[in-house]
Amino acid sequence: MERPYLHAFYTPDEANKPMSRVNEAVTSGSVKLMLFLPSGKKLWLVVGNDNEYWADPELGFCSCKDFYFTTLSGGDECYHLKSIRKALEENRFMSMEFMDNEYIQFLQAIAEDSANLLGRS
Ligand SMILES: [Zn+2]
């Protein structure tokens, strides 16, 4: 879907916002890596003001609304994915280790979060 009229609302200041949001997320330690052992599976978590979102930068997936409504329709990546990429670049993220048998519970939590999120619109 094309929404060219939206550009009218973006001033240069507005355009800088996603980047500072990314910086803020990275510097405040909102980006967390969950590492499952022994398999080495990874899940990323970005903690926001009112919610937390699951993302996978390798698959280019995020559980947030922006991802569904913007990224998937050909728009820019959401700030969670950008934050994770930046955190990876700068090696600034908190890493937590879990057992493999907890992985499925996390996946279920993600699925429920996503369903709730979309249902709320
Ligand atoms: Zn996102």
Image (cartoon, grey):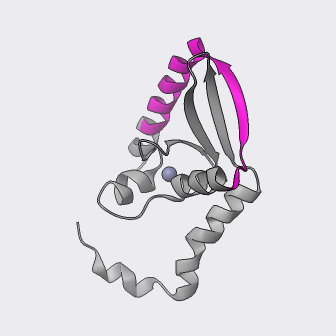
Q: Observer-nearest residue: 86 or 116?
A: 86
Q: From this viewpoint, which residue is outermost toward the right? A: 28
Q: Is residue 113 above or below residue 118?
A: above
Q: Is residue 48 visible?
A: no
Q: Residue at x 51, y 42 (%)?
A: 55
Start and end of the magenta stretch?
Answer: 90-114
Residue 94 is inside the magenta segment: yes
**Magenta stretch: dominant SS?**
helix
Q: Is residue 84 above or below residue 38?
A: below
Could you say where residue 27 lies in the image, as x and y percent from the top left?
A: 75, 58
Q: Observer-nearest residue: 69 or 80?
A: 80
Q: Quadrant of residue 36?
A: top right
Could you say where residue 73 lies in the image, as x and y percent from the top left?
A: 29, 58
Q: Residue at x 65, y 53 (%)?
A: 87
Q: From this viewpoint, which residue is outermost toward the left? A: 1
Q: Residue at x 24, y 71 (%)?
A: 2
